[in-house]
């Protein structure tokens, strides 16, 4: 399966990313801030090259594992930017573990080959979907940090997240709002151009991917309405966020995992 990665530079980049993530996960607390940022940037760059090797290869490949890998890479991009704005933000080891796992998973399951793209709308559909995945994943990470921070406050302990609770909450919902907009656009494009995307006679279908994605959209809509009208916040809001994100994960990555790994179908 690893050979399916195509070019050797893609494989080397994936190994480089995995090693860099491993260093971050195991030795983050012992590295200086400058060294930490250098290793994080190296991991981010290697990860990007590995993704490009699969998506831009001949033929391009995509599946549940590359989708998860790209989602994690987008989260790391957000984290890299935020760590400049909030130097006290502390989540290196957790994100490094996610990044390394995502890269290794993509090596093992590179996805199916696309010898031709059915429609010029398909890349847009993919891009919107993966971007919404990334934003909701970033919201989940911030929600997790928010829960840790809230727990530290209740226990009168030091805030492990390193960022004020209200700031984390505000960032969490900014990502939810942006992700909801992109998820809405993804579903709209999928509904409007279903036959062009997947071929004649393959109009909008209520399959597993569609059902889970629509359910996730409804949960996120409920979360935003609940926050605006009912003042949902804290652990209650985070639980709803986790529920919606879990449904969204099942929508594409889950259904593709079953097709590619369990059923061995494209």
Image (spheres, grey):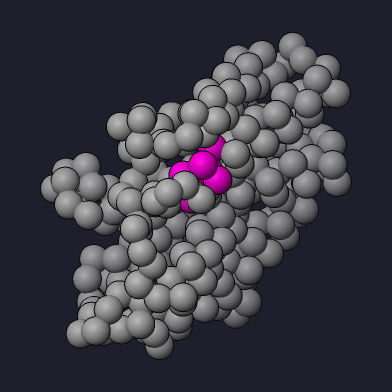
Report x, y in % for residue 172. Answer: 65, 57
Residue at point 67% right, 36% down? 45
Identify which residue, 134 or 142, lies in the foreground: 134
- Residue 137 visible in rendering: yes
Q: Give the magenta-colored segment's residue range.
A: 50-55
> Which of the 4 quarters of the picture holds residue 108?
top left
Report x, y in % for residue 37. Answer: 79, 29
On the rendered structure, is 10 left or right of 43?
left
- In the depicted structure, whether residue 53 falls above or below residue 177: above
Residue at point 69% right, 49% down? 78
User: In the orientation shown, which residue stands out farthest toward the left?
Assistant: 263
On the rendered structure, is 31 left or right of 179?
right
Report x, y in % for residue 189. Answer: 45, 81
Residue at point 30% right, 84% down? 195
Report x, y in % for residue 29. Answer: 72, 16
- In the depicted structure, whether residue 99 falls above or below residue 204: above
Identify which residue, 86 or 264, lies in the foreground: 264
Is residue 52 located in the magenta-colored stretch of the structure? yes
Residue at point 36% right, 30% down? 3
On the rendered structure, is 160 left or right of 97?
right
User: In the orientation shown, which residue stands out farthest toward the bottom?
Assistant: 192
Identify which residue, 198 or 252, lies in the foreground: 198
> Which of the 4 quarters of the picture holds residue 180?
bottom right
- Residue 153 visible in rendering: no
Is residue 251 located in the magenta-colored stretch of the structure? no
Image quarter hosting the C terminus: bottom left
Q: Main secondary structure of the magenta part?
A: helix
- In the depicted structure, whether residue 146 falls above or below residue 37: below
């Amino acid at each position: 399966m690893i050979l399916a990665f195509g070019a050797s530079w893609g494989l080397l980049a994936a190994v480089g990313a995995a090693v860099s993530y491993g260093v971050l996960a195991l030795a983050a607390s012992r590295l200086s801030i400058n060294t930490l940022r250098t290793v994080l940037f190296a991991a981010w760059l290697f990860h990007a090259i590995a993704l490009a090797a699969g998506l831009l290869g001949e033929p391009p490949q995509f599946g549940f594992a590359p989708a998860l890998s790209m989602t994690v890479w987008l989260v790391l991009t957000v984290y890299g930017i935020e760590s400049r704005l909030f130097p006290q933000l502390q989540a290196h080891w957790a994100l490094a573990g996610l990044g390394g796992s995502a890269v290794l998973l993509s090596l093992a399951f590179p996805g199916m080959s696309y010898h031709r793209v059915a429609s010029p709308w398909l890349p847009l559909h993919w891009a919107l979907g993966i971007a919404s995945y990334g934003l909701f994943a970033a919201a989940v990470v911030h929600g997790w940090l928010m829960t840790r921070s809230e727990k530290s406050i209740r226990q009168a302990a030091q805030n492990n997240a390193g960022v004020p609770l209200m700031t984390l909450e505000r960032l969490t919902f900014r990502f939810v709002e942006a992700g909801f907009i992109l998820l809405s656009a993804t579903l709209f494009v999928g509904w409007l151009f279903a036959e062009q995307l997947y071929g004649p006679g393959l109009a909008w279908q209520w399959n597993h991917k569609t059902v889970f994605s629509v359910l996730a959209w409804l949960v996120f809509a409920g979360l935003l309405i609940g926050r605006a009208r009912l003042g949902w916040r804290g652990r209650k809001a985070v639980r709803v966020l986790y529920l919606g994100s879990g449904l969204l994960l099942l929508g594409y990555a889950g259904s593709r995992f079953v097709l590619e790994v369990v059923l061995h179908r494209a």
